[in-house]
Image (cartoon, helix red, strand yellow):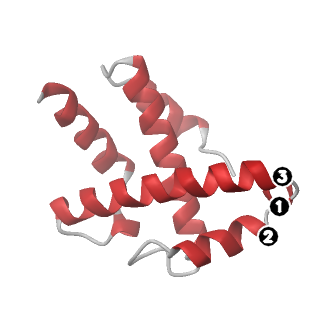
Amino acid sequence: MAIDRATIERIDATLLPQLDRHHLRVLSHCLDSFQTMAAPERTGAIPDESQRRLWCQQQPVVAEDPTFLDTLLLQFNAAAEQLDQLALELGKPPLELTLDDLISASEARCRG
């Protein structure tokens, strides 16, 4: 699962520093993955750690590499915390966050 070209182009069109754009691409990819894990609803709370692990174990490329699986799960845990915090600040369920929400938060963080 990868983020689409339009998403990458929107992120790259921001005036954010390169490292912040990279972080935004990773966070966007994680949000998309969480929404896929929660399908068909794609709303509400981010899937918990056990749901994330089960989903990852069902992805052939990930399941075949235990070291990558563990690294990916750590990344998902960090992203889940960040997305939960942003959702709390915006007063919306985490899986209803949008790319615009992520971009706005990143731009505000860079200005602040």
Of the pair 76 and 98, the residue shown nearer to us:
76
In the image, residue 84 lies at what x, y percent?
32, 63
Residues packed near mark 1 inside 10 Å, few (<14), some (14 to 19) or many (20 plus)? some
Mark 3–mark 1 Cα distance, whole angstroms, equals 6 Å
Amino acid carrying label 1: it is Ala
Mark 1–mark 2 Cα distance, whole angstroms, equals 7 Å
Whether pointer 3 and pointer 1 mark residues with C-beta atoms closer than 8 Å, the reply is: yes
**Residue that mark 3 sits on:** 65
Identify the image quadrant of residue 57: bottom right
Mark 3–mark 2 Cα distance, whole angstroms, equals 12 Å
Q: Mark 2 falls on what kind of element? A: loop
Amino acid carrying label 3: it is Asp
In the image, residue 39 lies at what x, y percent?
58, 77
Q: Mark 3 falls on what kind of element? A: loop
At x 24%, y 69%, the residue is 92
Name the side, left or right, on which 50 lies relative to 78: right
Of the pair 73 and 35, the residue shown nearer to us:
73
At x 66%, y 46%, the residue is 2
At x 23%, y 32%, the residue is 107
Q: Mark 1 falls on what kind of element? A: helix
Q: Which mark is residue 53?
A: none
**Residue that mark 2 sits on:** 58
Of the pair 64 and 83, the residue shown nearer to us:
64
Nearer mark to the viewer, of 1 and 2? 1
Instruction: Mark 1 or mark 2: name the one nearer the start of the chain.
Output: 2
Residues packed near mark 2 inside 10 Å, few (<14), some (14 to 19) or many (20 plus)? few
In the image, residue 64 lies at what x, y percent?
88, 56
Nearer mark to the viewer, of 3 and 2? 3
Identify the image quadrant of residue 74: bottom right
Whether pointer 1 and pointer 2 mark residues with C-beta atoms closer than 8 Å, the reply is: yes
Amino acid carrying label 2: it is Gln
**Residue that mark 1 sits on:** 63
